[in-house]
Amino acid sequence: MSRIAYVNGRYVSQARAAIHVEDRGFQFADGVYEVCALRDGHLIDEAQHMARLARSLAELKIRAPMSGTALAHVMREVVRRNRVANGLVYIQVSRGVARRDHGFPAASVEPTLVVTARTLDLTKYDELATKGISVILVPETRWARCDIKSTGLLANVLAKQQAREAGAFEAWFIDGEGFITEGASTNAWIVDKNNVLRTRSLSDAILPGVTRGEILSLCRQHEVVFDHSPFTADEALCAKEAFISAATMGVLAVKKIDNVKIGDGTPGPISAKLREIYWATRIT
Amino acid sequence: MSRIAYVNGRYVSQARAAIHVEDRGFQFADGVYEVCALRDGHLIDEAQHMARLARSLAELKIRAPMSGTALAHVMREVVRRNRVANGLVYIQVSRGVARRDHGFPAASVEPTLVVTARTLDLTKYDELATKGISVILVPETRWARCDIKSTGLLANVLAKQQAREAGAFEAWFIDGEGFITEGASTNAWIVDKNNVLRTRSLSDAILPGVTRGEILSLCRQHEVVFDHSPFTADEALCAKEAFISAATMGVLAVKKIDNVKIGDGTPGPISAKLREIYWATRIT
């Protein structure tokens, strides 16, 4: 079956799905995106992803390409046409096509909307969750507005590639003050020596992860003690547990950071519990 | 006459010139570009632009899409087909099309190459040069590798738009230590109170501007005293002269920074001289 993508009003063969060379998403990274997980045909945390998309667009003063209702329909139609039950939906919006010029184009320029979907092998993530993943630490090199889910991801690309080349799954950025911000495509968490779950508070320095927010809600419900204080690289290396969170992966325990074993080098109980209750509470 | 663009091996109508929705340039800003000025049919500072393109690609480990000789041919062919005498050639290279994944795709993935050309109204820049332009100062928000001419330009877009909304032509970034780095799409210069021409030395914090480099060569030849020391926002506001440089514009004097008159509010003699000799020495 050939895949189908939605591009600016049309459902087209994904092999031929194209945008103009003067799309501002291509020339300026002037756009935003969302990735929504699909489990058993359900869009996971959809409302939260749509709220974040609206926020990203508003921060950049990019017009929403269509109403929320229409976008919800398009997402479902792309999922249906691609027969995806478990996987992801990818939504990208750019400021549209205009003669190249850094400043915003005329307000009449239509934003570009691309929606794709694909199947993911969930057993791969389950295996990773059982074994734990490795993380490397890299200097923070990104721009000052990491709270906007923009397609300006080159620093993330380079960090992720550096992780791969080091045999690791993810790279965590360390800011100028020695604190971890987040991963190249995931949020970062530790259980510190006092058994307190810690993840950095929201600011311009990190993406407000939807899965991160949901995990914090679950912590409140399940009386997991947590703290929004940032943690240093040293605290991460000495943590009892560590994990990453992201929409498609849920929670994945970290077994090693910069080749240092975290805990006993296997997924810890809090990571495992949060992974379990996160997925268990997604489809209700 | 309809414009023609070169995209991955074909000359196509620019109206239909397209790249795939999974081009890494669109999804990750995983690509670089160059803008080369054209005057009277001549490509200006072509060798320097091609050297910088090669450097940007090497820094990102993106394969060159073709040999330098072949690219030089394509650039000329795009210029010829679009009948541009005065204007610019735009070259963009991305890491190519691959299923979305932050890490680099297989080495077999072909980079994407887009080349376009367009006519510019040079009288507009001459008028701006006579009047002088206005600049605003904004906090540096870009990533840590501004020396790479990547398409990750969202911070530049936002700064340029902020300048426009303030009635200014350009925005200069101020780094965390109070020093000007450069403009949103130009390099930044002042003539300080001691009549020394100053522009920031090369580092990860600024683009190694081709026009910047050529101006420094001309300063050596014409005994204009210059210094590579960075300057602060306060030094800029108290400067005797200020100007910006860029490939398509050459040198443009700054008459106001944050609404403060620079010198007497008209282009100063060093700015005017450098503008004149820069263009005079381009076509020889």
Image (tube, coloured by chain):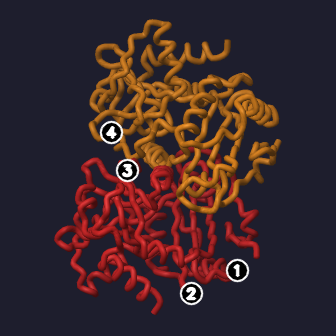
Chain colours: A red, B orange
Q: Amino acid at mark 4?
A: Asp
Q: Nearer the viewer, residue A2 or A202?
A: A2
Q: Amino acid at mark 1?
A: Arg
Residues flagged by tags 3 and 1 on a common chain: yes
- Secondary structure, mark 2, is loop
Residues flagged by tags 2 and 1 on a common chain: yes
- Quarter of the picture containing the N terminus of chain A is bottom right
**First-in-chain label (3 vs 1):** 1
Q: Chain ID for label 1? A: A
Q: Nearer the viewer, mark 3 or mark 1?
A: 3
Label 2 with label 1: CB-CB less than 8 Å? no
Locate residue B92: give its quadrant: top right
| Residue at 67% across, 47% down | B111
Q: Which residue is mark 2?
A: A40
Q: Which residue is mark 4?
A: B175
Any mark on residue A81, and which?
A: 1
Residue A163 in the image: x percent, y percent? 45, 54
Residue sitting at the far bottom:
A284
- Residue B98 versus residue B279 in the image, above or below: below
Residue A217 in the image: x percent, y percent? 32, 81
In three-dimensional space, the C-alpha distance between marks 3 and 2, rounded to whole angstroms, equals 36 Å
Q: Chain ID for label 4? A: B
Q: Which residue is mark 3?
A: A138
* Circle 3 crowding by C-alpha within 10 Å: few under 14, some 14–19, many from 20: many
In three-dimensional space, the C-alpha distance between marks 2 and 1, rounded to whole angstroms, equals 15 Å
